[in-house]
Amino acid sequence: MLKPVSVFTITIILHLYGAVFCNCYTSPNLSSPTSTPLLPRNLPFPSSTRSSTLLSATPPSPTQNALPYPVRIAVLGGGNFGLALASVCGRSGYSTTLLVRDPDVAEYVNKNNCHPRYMSDVRLGDKVRATTDAKSALKDATYIIHAVPVQYSRNFLLNVKPHIPIGTPVMSASKGIETTSLGFMADILEECLGKDRSYAFLSGPSFAREIAEERATAVVIASEDKQLADDLADIMSSANFRVFTSSDVMGIEVGGSVKNVIAIAAGMCEGLGLGTNAMSGLVTRGCGEMRRLGLYLGAEPTTLAGLSGVGDTFGTCFGPLSRNRNFGIRLGKGETMEEILATTTEVAEGVDTAGALVDLIKSRSKGYRLDLKYPIIFGVRDILEGKLGAREGLEGLMEMPLRLESYEATH
């Protein structure tokens, strides 16, 4: 039976078909009975061993995804996204160990096949086990998936480093910028675990609950090691979870960081009741700031227009499950930062990322009046720091100097 259509299904369809009208896609040979579906010309393609369509009619069996060597997955972090990715790997038939901090949580997961607090109605599958013992979780791991929030990642990685075998590749599913070092996850991983291993980075419109419920989802994995990206895509791809690949790590990192800040702004816009016109304009201009920063830092424009850039931004700004959007809605309705943080256990990465982005832009740029080039990023930072109210900050965007619409990397 088909799953209910989700916001991410709509996002993916709009993203794929909308690109046809932007000349981003290759038109099939309509005269040929064997012509292929519309596929991205410039966006990452699925690995050659996987179906090129977004969703396959028949789910692959675990043996279809099998690699020619034993595969054991270790997932670091027992939050929503760690649980979702563990369930993806387990459903593909791979032995998956979830490393958590709380012994009671580990015992509960192993007994009930679900988490006691996060997505407790979702079963993880028979292949997923939990432990608090880093040594046992990591010693035989073929691949490691890191799903710990960015601001906690450095200490976590340094603590488990002694148990990670030399050369074992690591994939990060965390998005954001560390406030202390202004480093992306690629920087944190190399500084903590060294350069003697390959790294990969997963991004795209992907709410954890919808992944765990096997709703249609498309993501991208970027790595400078093409074989690693292809192998991870083969492991994780299924009928409802499609994995594309890329080599543009910077594009993935920028998109995954900036979109959370844009989503807070979009949420405030909704909370204030400013209307659809304002929301659409704000998100579009926010994507422009993402493009400007990404190009300046060396990202590929096609990545920023892809699943990890515009695609993830759509989902995070408009999806009801978005933590950053919901945080912004509450700010727009008049709640204070302290009130919101005191009543939620989930991390809205954009709260820390906004200030880190401003500091990063200032440290990397030689330009002046950067607030005019990144008014949304700077504005969200000011609102979160209490320098402006939500309405004052967003309405101030309407008073920006008029200029040619351009999103090039001019600093």
Image (cartoon, helix red, strand yellow):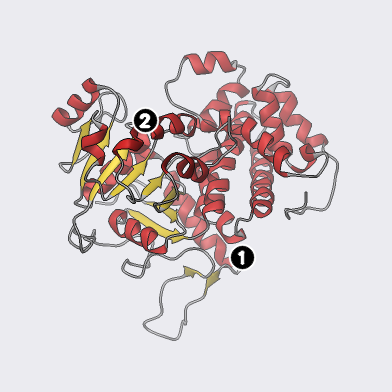
Q: Secondary structure at mark 2?
A: helix
> Relative to residue 30, is residue 403 drawn left or right?
right
Q: Is residue 155 left or right of residue 291?
A: left
Q: Please tell me the numbered disc located at residue 22.
A: 1
Residue at position x 47%, y 82% in the image: 29
Q: Secondary structure at mark 1?
A: helix
Q: Are marks 1 and 2 in contact (CB under 8 Å)?
A: no
Q: Residue furthest bottom?
A: 31
Q: Give the distance between the C-alpha atoms of the residues marked 1 and 2, in whole angstroms.
A: 47 Å
Q: Is residue 204 above or below residue 117?
A: below
Task: Name the amino acid type tagged 1.
Answer: Cys
Q: Give the foreground label among 1 and 2.
A: 2
Residue located 56% across and 53% down the image: 251
Quarter location, residue 264: top right
Left-right relation of 223 to 106: right
Give how far across and how far down residue 247 sits, in percent.
49, 60
Q: Which residue lies under the disc numbered 2? A: 159
Total labels drawn: 2
The residue lying toward the viewer, choosing from 361 and 166, is 166
| Residue 223 in sight in this render | yes
